[in-house]
Image (cartoon, grey):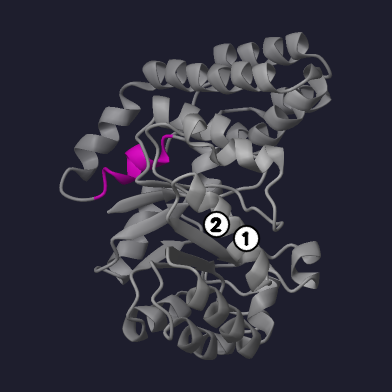
């Protein structure tokens, strides 16, 4: 089974990726948060610089509905050594969709088809797609998948929700099942894998599946891939091995947190910018601890790094990890 880290804007940039790669079971591929303009900003360029991603298999992602803009960014990325580009056809954000980008590209399959034709005709590298299954209804998926089948995609990463679902409700597994039966592409499943049991359920439904992408579940529990690796013959033994080393795991998670904090402090100006990023992380990471609510409220209110650090230290000292 191959494991991918999903791109999450403001969260899984190179600081987070490098810290994760150092302290936890490495991913087979890391996907960078999307680049949305025809020319990369300094922040976007810093995120994909090879020097900032040493030892990682990084796949840059582009968010656009203009072939000229895609090709301009892809050319610049190729100059940095990237020959696989991921196209975002899944972002459900209102501001993104209103411009016909992300999931907005799914509204008109003919427009999607024309866009893919133009970029595949002009780009000589490999292109993968991360997609949803429609805008309003999963009945749209059959026509959308037929468009994807026209092109030599590197792989097709499917989040089986429509845009109006955002992240609510259960993934629409019938749509993924249709792709398994009808698609000739290498497929990757993405959506609501938050525990080893979730992965086991997906692989039981799709026994030939050999690739999954982790998003919010991984941010909430960085040990998730290690728990998922327990699925199989050594399930109980491996699962117990993780649980039997709770104190070591807490120390590892604390070191991971400190690595992220220190690196943000080095590249960002002032406490406010650093704390903004750390607070975003705790929106998810708080789920890894017992009785975390009162600490999370203090973290949210903290305006100085010294106060923030004291609250985090108290949380690690006074509460236990939740690893299911």
For the point 46% across and 35% down, which residue is it?
222
Give the left or right position of residue 118, taking residue 22 as reference. right
Position of the C terminus by quadrant = top left
Instruction: Give the residue number, with chain letter if any, for mark 1.
Output: 72
Q: How many C-alpha atoms fall within 10 Å of the one at disc 1: few (<14), some, or many (≥20)?
A: some
Give the left or right position of residue 104, taking residue 21 as reference. right
Give the left or right position of residue 100, taking residue 240 as reference. right
Position of the N terminus by quadrant = bottom left
For the point 41% across and 72% down, which residue is it?
153
Judging depth in this view, the residue of 245 and 41 nearest the camera is 41
Q: Residue furthest left?
A: 233
Q: Where does the image place residue 238, in percent across and percent down from the top left?
A: 24, 36
Tell me which segment is drawn in magenta: 223-231
For the point 34% across and 29% down, which residue is it?
243
Spatial separation of the CA atoms under disc 2 and disc 1: 5 Å
Q: How many C-alpha atoms fall within 10 Å of the one at disc 2: few (<14), some, or many (≥20)?
A: some
- Is residue 54 magenta-colored? no
Using the rendered image of the protein, determine whether residue 163 is visible from the camera's viewpoint. yes
Instruction: Give the residue number, with chain letter if any, for mark 2.
Output: 75
As drawn, the label of residue 44 is none
Residue contact at pointers 2 and 1, CB within 8 angstroms: yes
Judging depth in this view, the residue of 234 and 24 nearest the camera is 24
Q: Looking at the image, is 159 positioned above or below residue 46?
A: below
Q: Where does the image place residue 120, in percent across and percent down from the top left?
A: 49, 75
For label 1, the SS is: helix
Q: How many marks?
A: 2
């Amino acid at each position: 089974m191959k494991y991918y880290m999903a791109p999450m804007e403001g969260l899984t940039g190179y600081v987070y990726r490098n810290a994760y790669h150092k302290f936890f079971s490495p991913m087979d591929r890391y996907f960078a948060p999307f680049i949305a303009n025809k020319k990369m900003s300094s922040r976007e360029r810093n995120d994909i610089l090879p020097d900032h991603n040493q030892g990682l298999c990084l796949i840059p992602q582009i968010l656009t509905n203009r072939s000229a803009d895609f090709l301009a960014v892809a050319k610049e990325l190729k100059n940095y050594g990237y020959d696989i580009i991921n196209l975002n056809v899944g972002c459900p954000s209102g501001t993104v969709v209103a411009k016909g980008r992300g999931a907005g590209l799914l509204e008109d399959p003919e427009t999607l088809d024309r866009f893919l034709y133009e970029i595949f005709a002009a780009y000589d590298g490999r292109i993968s797609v991360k997609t949803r299954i429609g805008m309003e209804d999963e009945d749209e998926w059959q026509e959308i998948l037929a468009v994807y089948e026209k092109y030599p995609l590197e792989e097709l990463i499917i989040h089986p929700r429509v845009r109006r679902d955002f992240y609510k409700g259960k993934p629409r597994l019938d749509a993924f099942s249709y792709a398994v039966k009808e698609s000739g592409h290498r497929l990757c499943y993405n959506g609501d894998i938050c525990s080893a049991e979730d992965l086991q359920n997906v692989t039981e439904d799709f026994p030939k599946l050999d690739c999954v992408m982790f998003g919010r579940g991984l941010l909430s529990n960085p040990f998730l891939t290690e728990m998922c690796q327990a699925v199989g013959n050594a399930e109980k033994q491996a699962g117990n091995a993780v649980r039997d080393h709770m104190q070591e795991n807490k120390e590892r998670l604390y070191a991971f947190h400190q690595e992220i904090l220190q690196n943000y402090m080095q590249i960002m100006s002032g406490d406010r910018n650093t704390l903004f990023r750390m607070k975003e992380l705790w929106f998810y990471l708080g789920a890894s601890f017992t009785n975390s609510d009162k600490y999370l409220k203090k973290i949210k209110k903290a305006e100085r790094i010294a106060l923030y650090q004291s609250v985090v230290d108290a949380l690690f000292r006074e509460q236990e990890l939740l690893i299911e």
